[in-house]
Image (cartoon, grey):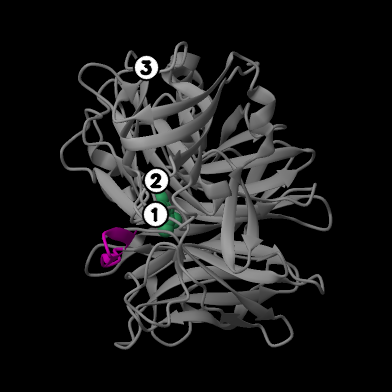
Amino acid sequence: MISKELLRAREYETIEGALVGEKDRPAFHFSPRIGWLNDPNGFSFYEGKYHLFYQYHPYDSHWGPMHWGHAVSTDLINWEYLPVALAPDTDCDGAGCFSGSAVTLPDGRQLLMYTGCDAKDLDPEGKWAQTQCLAVSNGDEYVKYEGNPVITRKDLPAGGDPYEFRDPYIWQAEDGSYRAVVANANKDGNKATQISMFKSNDAFHWSFDKVLFEDYRRIGIMWECPNFFALGGRQLLIASPMDMELEDAEGSIRFPKGNNVCYMVGDYDEANETFTPHQAASHEGASRSAFATYHPVDCGLDFYAPQVMKAPDGRTLMIGWMQDPSTANIHKIEDFRIFGQMSFPRELDLRGNRLVQWPAREMEECRKGRIISASMDIVSETKSIEGLSGRVLDMEIDISPRSSSAAGICSLDEFGIRFARDYDHYVELTYRPDSSVLTVDRSRSGQSDEITKRRSIRVRDRSGIISLRILIDRWSAEVFINGGEQVMSLTYYTPLEAQGITFSAEGSAIVDLTAYELIFDK
Ligand code: DQQ
């Protein structure tokens, strides 16, 4: 039976969602049908389609009681909204259906595992007790399991906080049994957070297995939304630590203060279920710990809570909420009926022990509009390129300093790209080859003063050369650096009339550029 909460949400999104036009949305970044979106959930391939569920508050453009929105796609570009899948409508999830993941059962049904927030069980700070719950596909519906919750406080290891216990990531192990890793704060004074692993033979009956990862170094207060998966012969743990301290080094910001996304590359001994992270060289600069094994997934201003899935063609795909969660409610969005967008899905790979990300190749199929190519010298000036403007573009650009007459002296002090530009506004990327520092700056994008405006990172030193691929989509940009070995994502709510793009150099730069106008068959 469909609950009144689910019915109400479906009626609301059908009526109100129809009022949001294509032009009111990002052109190719997934956005909610109506209202608010945060984390991707249940990102999966099921019955011939990609499925994307999402943390969803249909009634408002701010966070509220969490539902699971639902959409499907065959190409990762065009998404068809399906009715909201889960609403907070049972005893164990009455305050919200928080993040989770999906797996296909041997009988062909899809199982969703999510966190229920119990409205009647609160700690002294007012946090809801969190348990792990299930819903199973039955035709077009996802029916909550009558045995919910399936993992509760009694399953927690010592010190585990039942009020900070969420975001299960489920998978089927080689032997057919199931595992799920769940984020959990730990109240033991030495620890901050742990990623606990649970096991089940049938995906319905669960027991505690072991603590897969414990943080004694205070890398944030709680590692939300874990993902644990094999890639390139190694094993990766990706999670989103809340409230990290600033980690900077020599003019670059490895991790800004606040919420971040980290990855660890390691080896997984499946027989003993032991994950051993490796240390890896970092382009971003030294970390505060000489033994750092964790690295930023996205070095921009807006990226959080990503989810990773295996596509049937063998690709490992990741999609994230393209938003800094700590400032999500203070963006300048008065005119928007919707708030929140996902990153464009990224293909993941390993190069050495480094994570490499690249826009899903389906994007290249959309390069159907005008193509603008230019090779030029830019010498202490600002230039625009005839015909190059717009807010929906895929742009590839290689920048190198013109070789200097005096050996060892770099002929280029700084290179800049400004886009989403009009007389009053722009978003800027600047690159300084001498220090290999790339900065993204949205202080002139017209947003609230309270949001973080800029971030500088260190890129790999390639004798001053840098390659960028920039996906620009109405209110966001994703910048893939040097073939995807680093990425910077950010949003901005600059008026759409600001369409200009300019390039500038202090010194002398050689620039090769190809920009593709993107066309989507909707
Ligand atoms: N958002 C969800 C939680 C998760 C957090 C609630 C991360 O499940 O930990 O909307 O953004």
Q: Which of 43 and 497 is in front in this view?
A: 497
* Mark 3 Cα-neighbour bin, 10 Å: few <14, some 14–19, many ≥20: some
Q: Identify residue for label 1.
A: 407
Q: In this view, does 24 lie above or below 356?
A: above
Contact? badges 1 and 2 (CB < 8 Å): yes
Q: Which residue is drawn at 49% across and 71% down?
A: 281
Q: Place residue 451 in its image quadrant.
A: top left
Closer to the N terminus: mark 3 or mark 2? 2
Which numbered circle lies on residue 250?
Answer: none
Task: Give the amino acid type for the residue marked by disc 2 in the picture.
Answer: Ser
Q: Distance between the residues labelled 3 and 2?
A: 34 Å
Secondary structure at badge 1 equals: loop
Q: Can residue 232 be seen in this view?
A: yes
> In the image, which residues are magenta?
243-255
Q: Quadrant location of ligand 1?
A: bottom left
Q: Residue at x 20, y 20 (%)?
A: 424
Q: Identify residue for label 2.
A: 404
Q: Nearer the viewer, residue 48 or 411?
A: 411
Q: Residue 457, image x and y in percent?
A: 35, 55
Q: How far apart are marks 3 and 1 (CA)?
A: 40 Å
Residue 251: within the magenta? yes
